[in-house]
């Protein structure tokens, strides 16, 4: 058994999302395994793309198939570790299996997950998220990098980013075209950032919130207005700090189980006068500043006007 730490690279995503292609590019084109005397590639589903055994042998990469979920155990991995004594491990995971058990295994003890990449077909993402939301989120919630491939000029990058960030805030997102080139154009947002006042509609709230939380410097000093629900409890349970309240909206990613409150810290001297769970039209200046709630810098709202509002017909906002 090796005594030194063995890096493990995870690749997951649904079948036909480009996992095998990404693994092959990593191993062969990017020369990831060139300096290894022994590497282990574990493949957990049999897709359309196949591996060239001669190419693997040339790089001292040992291919093992584990196609049944019941066989993907710590004991099986320990056996493979003992047999091949790899210096690195690459796992092409099954797109229908839970990801969490990968991170809960404590054997082989030397194996350490150093990077996880999730591939997503941009053409089917919204359909899968709508119809198989739980499985889609399972693939993305622990990924370090999420790669949308087969992108076109029509790919709604801002919408995709908001969906991903609602599931996995730290993830890096890459958009790749069908020809393999990277689409690094700025995301197109459905509101005008150059306007004197950014008016955020219900339809755009989730996109605006996620973009503002991710890029607070971009919004520093800008004025925004939106319809919001107030979080400002007075009963002592989860009470917010005096002189502050949290306006926001409940958002649904794809199903009722995924509803979450998207709210920002708001500093207001008359905060106590605003009833908890009341609806308001808020116009506020955004400042990018330190807030303990964010554990660092983030967008803090300073009201210019606060007006009572009627509850909307649909209280939820959406990422689509």
Image: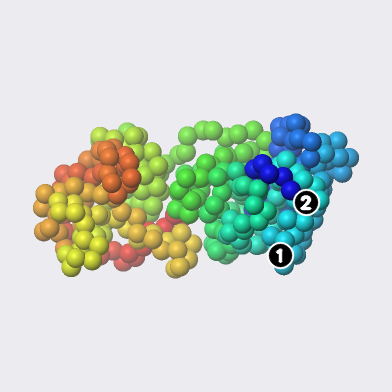
Position of residue 149 measured from the top left corner of the image (x, y, whole percent) = 63, 43
Q: Residue at x 41, y 63 (%)?
A: 259
Can residue 159 be spotted in the picture? Answer: no
Q: Check disc 2 and report the residue beneath it.
A: 82
Position of residue 160 measured from the top left corner of the image (x, y, whole percent) = 51, 48
Horizontal side, residue 128 vs residue 276: left or right: right
Can residue 237 be spotted in the picture? Answer: yes
Q: Nearer the viewer, mark 1 or mark 2?
A: 2
Quadrant of res 72? bottom right
The residue lying toward the viewer, choosing from 254 and 201, is: 254
Coloured how? rainbow
Q: Residue at x 72, y 45 (%)?
A: 2
Mark 1 vs 2, N-terminal side:
1
Q: Residue at x 32, y 46 (%)?
A: 294
Position of residue 309 measured from the top left corner of the image (x, y, whole percent) = 20, 60
Q: In the image, is residue 91 above or below residue 69?
A: above
Horizontal side, residue 162 vs residue 64: left or right: left
Q: Residue at x 53, y 54 (%)?
A: 141
Neighbours of disc 1 within 10 Å: few (<14), some (14-19), many (20+): few
Quadrant of res 180? top right
Neighbours of disc 2 within 10 Å: few (<14), some (14-19), many (20+): few
Quadrant of res 9? top right
The residue lying toward the viewer, choosing from 50 and 200, is: 50
Residue located farthest toward the right when viewing the structure as drawn: 54
Q: How many marks?
A: 2
The dot on residue 207 is none
Q: In the image, is residue 141 above or below residue 195?
A: below
Q: Check disc 1 and report the residue beneath it.
A: 69
The secondary structure type at the circle numbered 1 is helix
Does the residue at mark 1 contact the one at mark 2 (Cβ under 8 Å)? no
């Amino acid at each position: 058994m090796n005594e030194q730490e063995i890096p493990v690279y995870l690749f997951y995503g649904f079948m036909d999302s480009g996992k095998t292609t990404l693994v092959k590019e990593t191993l062969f084109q990017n020369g990831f395994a060139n300096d290894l005397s022994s590497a282990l590639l574990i493949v957990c589903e049999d897709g359309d793309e196949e591996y060239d055994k001669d190419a693997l042998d040339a790089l001292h990469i040992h291919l093992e198939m584990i196609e049944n979920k019941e066989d993907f155990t710590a004991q099986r991995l320990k056996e493979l570790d003992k047999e091949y004594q790899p210096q690195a491990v690459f796992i092409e995971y099954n797109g229908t299996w839970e990801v969490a058990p990968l991170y809960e295994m404590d054997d082989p003890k030397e194996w350490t997950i150093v990077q996880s990449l999730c591939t997503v077909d941009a053409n089917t993402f919204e359909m899968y998220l709508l119809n198989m939301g739980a499985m889609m989120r399972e693939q993305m919630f622990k990924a370090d990098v999420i790669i949308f491939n087969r992108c076109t000029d029509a790919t709604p990058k801002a919408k995709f980013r908001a969906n991903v960030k609602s599931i996995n805030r730290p993830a890096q997102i890459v958009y790749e075209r069908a020809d393999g080139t990277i689409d690094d154009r700025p995301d197109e947002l459905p509101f005008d950032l150059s306007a004197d006042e950014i008016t955020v509609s219900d339809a755009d709230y989730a996109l605006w919130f996620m973009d503002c939380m991710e890029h607070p410097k971009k919004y520093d000093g800008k004025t925004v207005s939106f319809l919001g629900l107030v979080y400002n409890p007075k009963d002592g349970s989860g009470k917010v700090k005096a002189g502050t309240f949290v306006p926001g909206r409940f958002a649904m990613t794809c199903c009722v189980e995924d509803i979450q409150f998207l709210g920002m810290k708001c500093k207001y001297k008359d905060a106590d006068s605003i009833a908890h769970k009341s609806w308001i039209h808020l116009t506020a200046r955004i400042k990018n500043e330190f807030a303990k709630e964010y554990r660092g810098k983030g967008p803090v709202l300073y009201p210019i006007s606060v007006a009572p509002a009627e509850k909307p017909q649909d209280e939820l906002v959406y990422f689509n």
